[in-house]
Amino acid sequence: EGTPRSVLILLSDGVDFGSPVTETQLSRAVEAANVGIYPIPFVPSTFAAAAPGFRVGPFSRSGGTYQRAPSAPDTLAARSFLTRLADASGGLVLTSAGHGLAEALDRMLEELGAQYVVGFSPSSGAPGRSHKLEVRLKDRRLKLRYRERYRSR
């Protein structure tokens, strides 16, 4: 019997501000988790225009300074990162096409309500080992989204 699948809604610009976690480490963690990641990208420059005094950490009590976030991220690279993260988890990048957060969340609920779960038990494999998955459909008109890798437990 499997474990319930969780969903992570990620509001992000897709830009790393100095995390100690590499993308490879993150990919391994996503493989091991039974969670669908649904990023909702935003462009920080539009947020910063609404709140010009907005600053991000880290905050140093001894020095008392904040470091500013970069004002113009490489949106193509950032969007690509969020797409890789969603794809690795079997999730989907949600966009609102200018209609707001509610539209993106409605799209996610629609997606989750139309999912089927297919389970299997691998014939062998040591715990923690990464496995590649491939799923094919005869009817090419159907949309298929699935995790391409998983880690055995």
Image (spheres, grey):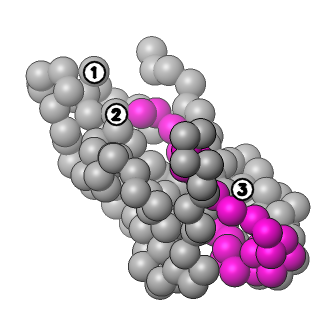
For mark 2, what is the residue?
Answer: 32
Q: Residue at x 79, y 69 (%)?
A: 53
Name the foreground residue: 124 vs 47: 47
- What residue type is disc 2 on? Ala
Asked whether the residues under the numbered discs 1 and 3 touch, taking CB atoms below 8 Å apart as contact, a structural biologist would say no
Name the foreground residue: 59 vs 89: 59
Q: Earlier in the sequence, mark 1 or mark 3?
A: 3
Residue 87: image quadrant is bottom left
Q: State how far apart marks 1 and 3 are (Cα).
A: 28 Å
Q: Residue at x 18, y 21 (%)?
A: 127
For mark 1, what is the residue?
Answer: 153
Name the foreground residue: 124 vs 44: 44
- What residue type is disc 1 on? Arg
Q: Position of residue 123 (x, y in %)?
A: 15, 25
Badge 3 element: helix
Residue bounds of the magenta highlight: 33-60
Q: Is residue 50 magenta?
A: yes
Q: Residue furthest top?
A: 1
Residue 131 in sight here: yes
Task: Give the number of callouts.
Answer: 3
Dot 2 crowding, Cα within 10 Å, few <14, some 14–19, many 20+: some
Q: Earlier in the sequence, mark 3 or mark 2?
A: 2
Q: Residue at x 35, y 38 (%)?
A: 29
Q: Residue at x 49, y 67 (%)?
A: 15
Q: State how far apart marks 2 and 1 are (Cα).
A: 8 Å
Dot 3 crowding, Cα within 10 Å, few <14, some 14–19, many 20+: some
The dot on residue 105 is: none
150 relative to 77 in the view: left or right: left
For mark 3, what is the residue?
Answer: 108
